[in-house]
Amino acid sequence: MGTENTSAPPRAQSAPADNPTRTRRHGGGIVHENTRHTTRFVVIGNHLVQHKELSLLAIGLSCHLQSLPTGAGADIKSLAARFPEGPTRIAAALRELEAHGYLRRERHRTQTGRIVTRTVSCNQPHADRRREPADTGCPPAKRTPPPQRRTVQKALPAVPQPSSTAPALLQTAIDLLATLRRHDPRLLLSATDTAHLVPGVAAWLERGVAPSAVRHALTTGLPDEPLRRPAALLAHRLTDRLPPPPPFGTPSAAGPPPRHPLQNCEGCDRGFRAPYPENRCRDCRAASHP
C-alpha cells in the first residue's frame, strides 16, 4: 500500500496567478492582429482606454467624441439619436469624462448675441490639482502651465448725443434708466453705466419719442440667457434703433410741459390753470364776449 505507482502521470503544477507566461502556455488571452491605418483613424492614448475609474460607456463615448470632426453635434440630444444608450446614461458618461478632465463644456456668445455651448474633447487632459490623479498605469505626461490671461474690461459702445443738455431732459433720461430693472431684473445698472447711457436716452427723447416707447425699445425681445454686460446691450440698442429726427417745426420732447398755477373762476367757481392770474375761466370769458 505504501508502494508508489510509477505508471501514473505526475500531478500538474498550477502556475501562480501573477505568472505572465501562463496564458501563453495554455493558448488563452488576447492576441492582436493589427493592420496599419493610413486614412480615417484617430490616435487614442492608453491612459483613456485603460482607465481604471471610467466606465466602459464613458471610455467608448470619449473615443467617439475624439473621432468627430470639428463642429459636429456633441450634445446629449445628438448623441442619444446616434447611440441606443439613451440620454440618461449618455449624460452620466459625459459627467464622468468632465470629472476626469477628458471633456469641457464652455458657453460662448456668437456675433448675433446668441449663447451656444461648445464641447471640448481632450485627448490628453490636464491633472486636476484639487485631487490626486487616477492611477492609469501610464507614466505622467509633461504638462506646461497655461499662460496667465489678464481680463480687460471692454469699454461700452458709444451712444447718440443730444443737441440739448436741459436738466429736465437729462433727469427724465435718468429716471427712465433707473426703472428698467422693474421690467427686467437683469437691467440693474451701476451709476457709471447710467451716466454713460443718459445722453443716448436723451437723444431719443428730444426726437419726440415718448419715455414709454423708449423703455419698450430697450426691454423688448431680450435674449433668454443671462446678460453679462446689460449696459453694452442697451448702448447698442440706443445707437442701432435710433429713430430719425422729427420733421421741422415739430416740438421736441425736451422736457415735461410746465404746470401753470391753479385758480378758481369767479363766474362758475370752477378750477382752472393759467400762466398768469385770471378772474374767469375760458368758457366764462367766451360767454361774456359773444
Image (spheres, rainbow, N blue to C red):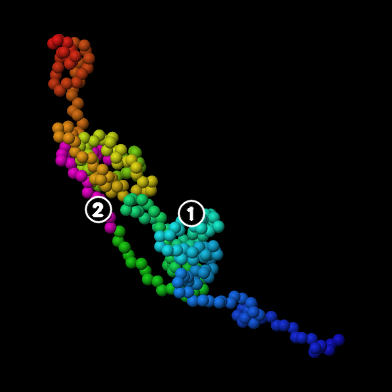
Q: Disc 1 versus disc 2: distance between alpha carbons?
A: 38 Å
Q: Residue 41 carries which label?
A: none
> Compared with residue 263, is residue 184 higher up or lower down, i.e. above or below?
below
Sort mark 2 into few (<14), some (14-19) or many (20+) by Cα contacts within 10 Å.
Answer: few
Magenta stretch: includes residue 67: no
Provide residue 145's location: percent of width, then percent of height: 37, 69
- Please give the residue where the numbered disc 2 appears in the rendered image: 155
> Which segment did they paint magenta?
152-178
> In this view of the protein, which residue sits in the foreground, 265 or 224?
224
- Please give the residue where the numbered disc 1 appears in the rendered image: 77
> What residue sits 25% from the left and 45% below the top?
240
Closer to viewer: mark 1 or mark 2 = 1
Residue 205 occupies quadrant: top left
Provide residue 179's location: percent of width, then percent of height: 30, 38
> What residue sits 72% from the left and 83% below the top?
12
Magenta stretch: includes residue 175: yes
Classify the position of the C terminus by image quarter.
top left
Q: Residue furthest front?
A: 39
Side of 34 where 268 appears, left or right:
left
Amino acid marked by disc 2? Ala
> What residue sits 46% from the left and 63% below the top?
65
Residue 5 occupies quadrant: bottom right
Secondary-structure class at tag 1 = helix
Side of 12 where 43 appears, left or right:
left
The answer to whether one can see residue 102 in this image is no
Provide residue 52's location: percent of width, then percent of height: 54, 68
Residue 152 occupies quadrant: bottom left
> Compared with residue 149, is residue 191 higher up or lower down, i.e. above or below?
above
